[in-house]
Image (spheres, rainbow, N blue to C red):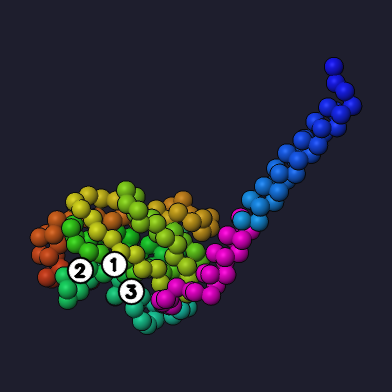
Amino acid sequence: MTTGTDHSMGEAIAARIERRWATLSIVIVGVLVGMAAFIGIHQATMPQGHVETADPKTLHLSGEFIESNLGTSVEADGSVTVRAIGQQYSFTPQCVVVPADTPVSFRATSADVVHGFLIEGTNINAMLVPGYVSVLPARFNAPREHVMPCQEFCGIGHQGMWGKVKVIDKAAFSKLSATRRRLTCVD
Ligand SMILES: [Cu+2]
């Protein structure tokens, strides 16, 4: 049997528990809003230390991404740099050749819209944004072929936009690079 006092006590307890849960949910929302605001403001006030730009309108005319400069080149320290561009609907070079077991730096940009730069079987995955240079350090342990599909929808021919990365033996690569300044495996 419930008396009047029991009833009002039960009500008071229920109200207290409910208030606690309400306070907790407001605190959780507050913390999340605070975190989102902090990350947004922090990133806006501390932009990347290093942003490189490349004018998509003049990529083919001058500068780092002219056609003769695309492909793989060997640096003085023995590492290699790969320069590539993405455009609707292909990559240049279509097939990238790099040595195994060597530090590789990919430098790529887009000539038109946003494309994706993804090398299957690795953690290399970036956007190619017109106007900006995407720089990606990499190292491939062993010779093999990787497919390199565009993973950002870029228009009607997107599904046909594929490239290839061919990792070859270090010795074979140095033999190849002795004959040419820029290497690709297109030809
Ligand atoms: Cu694309």
Q: Amino acid at mark 3?
A: Glu
The numbered mark, 3 or 2, whose residue comes first in the sequence reads 3
Of 187 and 143, nearer the camera is 143
> Quick check: is 46 in the magenta stretch?
yes
| Tags 2 and 1 touching, CB below 8 Å | yes
Is residue 21 found left or right of 77 in the rendered image? right
Residue depicted at 57% across the width and 65% down the height: 38
> In this figure, which residue is indicated by the disc labeled 1?
105
Give the vertical position of 53 relative to 92 (above or below).
Answer: below
Residue annotated with mark 2 = 79
Residue 11 seen in the current view: yes
The quadrant in which the C terminus is found is: bottom left
Secondary structure, magenta segment, majority class? helix
- Tell me the kind of residue under disc 2: Ser
| Residues packed near mark 3 inside 10 Å, few (<14), some (14 to 19) or many (20 plus) | some
Name the mark nearer the viewer: 1 or 3. 1
Q: Residue at x 87, y 29 (%)?
A: 5
Is tag 2's residue or tag 1's residue first in the polypeptide sequence?
A: 2
Residue type at the position of mark 1? Ser
For the record, the magenta segment spans: 32-54
Q: Residue furthest right?
A: 4
Residue at 44% in and 59% down: 116
> Which residue is tagged 3?
67
